[in-house]
Image: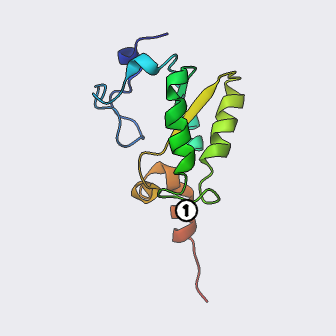
Amino acid sequence: MASLHALMLKGPHKIQGIGAGFLPAVLDVNILDEVIQVSLYLTIKHFVHVLITRNDALEKSIEHFNANRDISRGLKDDPSHDELITFMKIWQLRIKYAFVVLPSFRERYLSTVLFDSLQEEAENMTFD
């Protein structure tokens, strides 16, 4: 496994909120079995941050996540589960657990490349 410091995204990029060049104190790297670096395209396409682990210690966290699925989003409204499955298929991952981390609401990204298609659609709207 590559060093987490080596995998950190630094410098100019299109993903807001990362790239400061440090690992947050709340990240327990001891529970991570593997970190996979993905392309900007894949990150934007799937709009999901994934932590992958085979560690049974996370089972309670998964149960908590499943029990609180309605927090800040609805299951039908958020495609992250489907995106995670797609991500796993792309990487052919055979893992015990995979996490989708939803750190914030999506409206904060409306002005970014993640929503370019919506901006183009809005700019090209015609009114009768």
Amino acid tagged 1: Leu
Residue for point 51% across, 69% down: 123
Is residue 90 visible in the rendered image? The answer is: yes
Secondary element type, mark 1: helix
Q: Position of residue 84 (x, y in %)?
A: 63, 38
Please report the residue visible at 51 percent of the width from the left and 34 percent of the height from the top.
60
Q: Quadrant of the C terminus?
A: bottom right
Eyeballing the image, is 22 above or below 83?
above
Residue occupied by mark 1 = 118
Residue at image coords 39%, 36%: 13
Please indicate whether residue 5 sits to the left or right of residue 85 in the image: left
- Please state which of residues 126 and 7 is positioned toward the viewer in this rendering: 7
In the displayed structure, 18 sits above or below 70; it is above
Q: Reply above or below: 46 against 76.
A: above
Q: Nearer the viewer, residue 64 or 113?
A: 64
Where residue 40 appears, x then y in whole percent?
51, 34
Residue 93 picture quarter: top right
Check the image and report above or below for 23 versus 34: below
